[in-house]
Image (cartoon, rainbow, N blue to C red):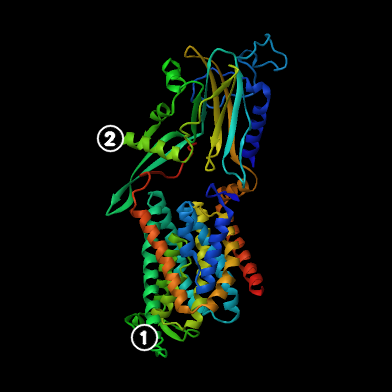
Amino acid sequence: MEIYLPIAEQSINVLVLLGLGGAAGLLAGMFGVGGGFLATPLLIFAGIPPTVAVASQANQVIANSVSSLQVQWRRGLVDLRMGLVLLLGGMLGSSAGVSLFTYLKRIGQIDFVIAVLYVVMLSTIGGLMMVESLRTYLQRRRHPEAPRGKLHQHYLVHRLPFKLRFYKSKLYISALLPIGLGFAIGILSAVLGVGGGFVLVPAMIYLLGMPTTVVIGTSNFQILFVAANVTFLQAVTNGTVDVVLALLLILGGVVGAPIGARLAAKLPGVVLRGLMAVLILAVAAELLVELLRTPGSVYSLGSREVLP
Amino acid sequence: MRPAAFLLVVGLAVAGPASAQAPFPEAPGAALPAPGLGGPTDAGAPPSVPVTPPAPPDLVVDLSLARVSITSAFQGENILLFGMFDPPGEVVVVVVGPPARETVLRKERFLGLWLTTGRQAFDDVPAYYAIAASQPLQRLLARGAGGEILSLEDRMASVRSVGQRESEDMTRFRLGLIEVKRHQGLYPAAIGQVTVQASRLFRVDLPFPSRLPEGVYDVRTYLLREGQIVAAVSRPLPVSKVGFSARLANWANREGELYGVGAIFMALLFGWFGGAVLRRI
């Protein structure tokens, strides 16, 4: 069953898109992070132009994060103050990111940059997850009752100025830190179409030292608004947001997320993380092969301009 | 909605039988000849009361579809062009999409990675170009009609480049442009011969891929005798998005701000209710 995507200007199988959305939702349900970082490369493999894939994926991220946020907000798992400070950086970063995206698109390098950034990002995350889950697995086998480490340590970064008190996170740190973090995630979000939860969540835990209970909710809060900002700016400046594409991904994701959550409850976390790491590394490898392989044609076309 | 309505009017006018026989004497490159005005001799008179008794036309052409409508279910289209001619003669069909500026990007290996390193823009590149004939084309064109009827290679050789470049390299970009367009199905290499039956009926299939630029395409049919064009018929073929996908694309183009806000609310709505409903199941 094919459907014509009005902005991507091509037809694609509906089931492929629903399946992709479902797989992303499955991951979201299993790991509590959006599956955007896998869905975008898969969309590109399916033949969607990278620029449309990224912008429409940002649109999908909104649905993903609002869906999780409505529960986390009710349970009081959002540090609003931290969220707003992160968001300040996120808005600046995502706006700068869309400008960067527009510039790269104009000089014809955006597809390359998207692919390279995905390879770097996915292989880093996949590699780290793989190492971590293997280590945990081996440790558990040796010492089933391994002691837990300190929740957070004090680094140099805690000496920065503009300190703010974050009551819910029980932190007294410089506002520059979350602003900078938000800025970096915002750029990532704009250029790659991801929410950035998979980078933001570990950074909030290990870099800011936030308690894990409020991390997911707070990151979802910031991601929701940053994704909305990216969607808006992409629609206005590049016209690459395909709502039909986004809607199909969202519908798939809505079905996939609860299934993922149920699966996660059944499988041990170490196994889950190991599987996820394998999946991420496989996608990174495929993207890298695409970059290294001699293309079928060294020529391609940029955007077509109808002159008056 | 206004452009769509305009195209519809053009489409309807073209669908009338009178216009199908309107001959046009002009060279290619002239935009659409005004359809539906009968022959050149009686432009002012009503078509139903011809001043001179009409000579039976040498060439009659029709299309199986008057327009290409890109709907939500669009997967490309095959249009049958068919007609009748007065023998003897050979038939040549040329379909040209609307011109635009195209930028060709070239990748090169850089530190092992394939990276875009060169770019070259060309003006007046037809969105679509297909040519077919009832005889091997090269043989027909070699006999003198080549001035007006251009093979793809000849047509592309006349495409203007933007800026300067060493000529050998420019040729490579030109060939690259053809290669990509061909790969996209927009310059179908062999749409097959025009088949002739009973030495006066002819037909040919025109393939249009799913990634089809919008605009008014020009479908021209020529009748050749002894290498000379003795009759020609031009039919505009509008290609446009219609219905839901047209409205969405239009909206996204003209009111990006509103479209962006709409996209955000769509996602919020489906995310919120989708999540709420499915958590209960």
Residue at figure coordinates x 50%, y 66% from the top left: A35
Under tag 1, what secondary structure? loop
Chain to which mark 2 belongs: B
Could you tell me residue B182's position as x and y percent? 44, 37
Could you tell me residue A64's position as x and y percent? 55, 67
Residues at discs 2 and 1 in contact (Cβ within 8 Å): no
Label at residue A153? 1
Q: Are marks 2 and 1 on the same chain?
A: no
Left or right of A177: which side holds B7?
A: right
Left or right of A217: which side holds B278?
A: right
Residue at figure coordinates x 58%, y 71% from the top left: A259
Position of residue A60 relative to residue B84, above or below, is: below
Left or right of B176: which side holds A247?
A: right
Chain to which mark 1 belongs: A
Position of residue A171 relative to residue A237, above or below, is: below
Name which quarter of the figure residue A257 lies in: bottom right
Residue at figure coordinates x 51%, y 53% from the top left: A240
Q: Is residue B105 visible?
A: yes
Judge the density around disc 1: few (<14), some (14-19), many (≥20) Cα neighbours within 10 Å.
few
Q: How many marks?
A: 2
Label at residue A145? none
Calculate the distance from the C-alpha at mark 2 to the C-alpha at mark 1.
Answer: 62 Å
Residue at figure coordinates x 51%, y 21% from the top left: B134
Instruction: Return the residue nearer the eye: B88 or A156.
Output: B88
Judge the density around disc 2: few (<14), some (14-19), many (≥20) Cα neighbours within 10 Å.
few
Could you tell me residue A85's position as x and y percent? 47, 75
Instruction: Return the residue nearer the eye: B157 or B51.
Output: B157
Name which quarter of the figure residue A254 lies in: bottom right
Residue type pointed to by label 2: Glu
Q: Residue furthest top?
A: B52
Residue wearing tag 2: B166
Residue type pointed to by label 1: Gln
